Amino acid sequence: MSVSKETKKVTTHTLQRMKAAGEKISMITAYDFSFARIFDQAGIDVILVGDSASNVMAGHETTLPITLEQMIYHASSVIRAVNRCLVVVDLPFGSFQSNSEIALASAIRIMKETGAHAVKLEGGEEEIDSVKRIVSAGIPVMGHLGLTPQSIYKFGTYNVRAKEEAEANKLKKDAQLLEEAGCFGIVLEKIPAVLAKEVSESLTIPTIGIGAGGFCNGQVLVMHDMLGINTEFKPRFLRQYLNLYEQVTGAVQHYVADIKSQDFPNENESY
Ligand code: KIV
């Protein structure tokens, strides 16, 4: 039997065992009660309440505007739906950067006010003090390296990161430092598959890839992308499992037509 089936609630220790057993970890983003319930019951291991909520829920161009309060609202909704998954919540831009005291206070608010199980933060060496401080308060931390969207204005594009040797070396060092600082896992976003393989093999903690190839210990996608709610975002790494945009459009057009034609509601749908 797989590790994930025999374990009732997924914990950070479960993920560690899954890596050791060679079982891949499934992770998806969610931001509300209804989808989180579906994902939990469908067998997902980890739900990420990502700051991508800033894009897909609020319609912002970047992840920078979302606030800690808004992340707490989304995470609380997700937590109410979940029985089995591990729920990880992003520390949003401005709630942790380069200040371990603020980082700890933000992480504590997330844990206390949402009931989430862990936090995630973007960055390597420059955030190590924050990671150590949060971990020593008993809060599990997931790292995030590679394309870190909170730094989009530094990068200038959403292109693949760490293709050059210097950036790849920094990423490898950052991954090592995050593991030593106590992270229970690291998201690797949009980096070459060979680099993700090397990092995954060099760490004892699991790596979760998005646009980082098949050698990571798990995979994550943004729910709106994999369900085809977003139609305009089609990067090479994305596998779209549904075209919900088309299906919802068809259903809503049908509903409108039924109202206009007075087909809805019929006698059985009336009191
Ligand atoms: O915010 C998010 O959805 C993320 C994933 C892309 C990993 O950080």
Image (cartoon, helix red, strand yellow):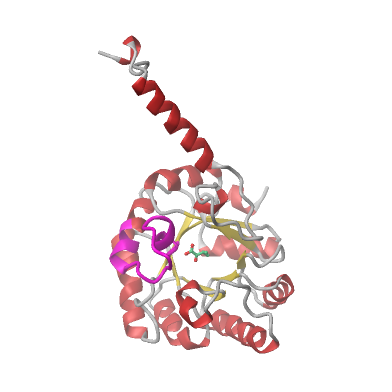
Name above or below for residue 186 compared with residue 164: above
Residue 158, placed above or below residue 30: below
Chain part drawn in magenta: 50-73
Q: Is residue 50 left or right of residue 3?
A: left
Task: Give the residue drawn at x 63%, y 73%.
Answer: 160
Q: Position of residue 117 (x, y in %)?
A: 42, 62
Front-lying residue, 71 or 24: 71
Q: Quadrant of residue 24?
A: bottom right
Q: Is residue 53 magenta?
A: yes
Residue at x 32% of width, y 10% of height: 267
Q: Residue at x 36, y 58 (%)?
A: 58
Q: Is residue 34 left or right of residue 242?
A: left
The residue depicted at 36 percent of the width and 86 percent of the height is 99
Give the answer, above or below, for where 126 lies relative to 9: below
Residue 54 in percent (x, y) is at 39, 62
Query: Against 178, is 215 above or below?
Result: above
Q: In which quadrant is the C terminus drawn?
A: top left
Which quadrant would residue 193 be assigned to in this image?
Answer: bottom right
- Could you tell me residue 100's position as x and y percent? 37, 85
Q: Is residue 157 left or right of residue 21?
A: left
Percent across and percent down for residue 233 are: 55, 57
Asked whether 36 falls inside the magenta stretch, the response is no
